[in-house]
Image (cartoon, rainbow, N blue to C red):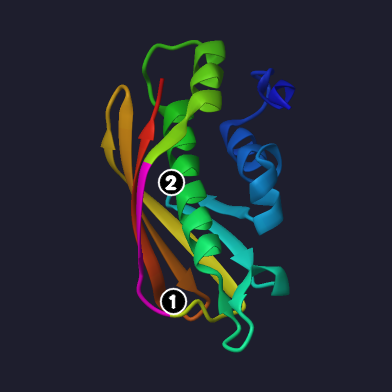
Amino acid sequence: MSELFSSESLSIKEMVRIGVEEFIPFNKVLGLKLDSMEPMIVSFEMRPELVGNPGLAVLHGGVISAVIDATGGIAIIHHLLTRDDGLSFDEKRKQFLRVGTIDLRVDYLKPGRGNKFFTTAQLLKTGRNIMVVRMELHNEDELLIAAGTGSYIVR
């Protein structure tokens, strides 16, 4: 699927959207959608497959962690594609395809109740090889459900 990113004719927004919604198979399973790039907002809707405790009908903790992690990676990809670093499009594309999580901490603050959820991301450190991102997960009532910090390798 890397051919999706082989053309400079795609806008940055379209490349990021493809990365969120189509390129990574697990993001498709989660149903992630790119709502905004500045600020970075990714959303998904509650579905029975995402429930961790059927008696409580709340999001599975692994889903929360995965969505927080994915949103951090998406924020980094957007940053890589938009920063003025003198790299060619092909070099940026290669960076995009090599981003990886090296550390992730998630704090579960409230049960994951809701019909629609939103994750936001804020870059804390944008180094040459390591980037750090702060993410939050809210429901449609703006209740903070979880927060996370991730470190990502950028080679």
- Residue 129, position in %: x, y? 32, 23
The dominant secondary structure in magenta is strand
Stretch of the chain drawn in magenta: 103-110
50 relative to 66, above or below: below
**10 lies left or right of 100:** right
Q: Amino acid at mark 1?
A: Glu
Residue sitting at the far bottom: 55
**110 lies left or right of 49:** left
Question: At 50% from the left edge and 76% from the top edge, which residue is drawn?
Answer: 112
103 relative to 129, above or below: below
Query: In 3D space, how far apart are the residues under numbered discs 1 and 2 (Cα atoms)?
Result: 19 Å
Q: Is residue 84 magenta?
A: no
Q: Which mark is residue 91?
A: none
Q: Is residue 105 magenta?
A: yes
Q: Secondary structure at mark 1?
A: loop
Which residue carries the number 1 mark?
142
Q: Which mark is residue 72?
A: 2
Q: In which quadrant of the rendered image does the N terminus lie?
A: top right
Q: Secondary structure at mark 2?
A: helix
100 relative to 109, above or below: above
- Residue 143, position in %: x, y? 41, 78
Residue 47 visible: yes
Q: Amino acid at mark 2?
A: Gly
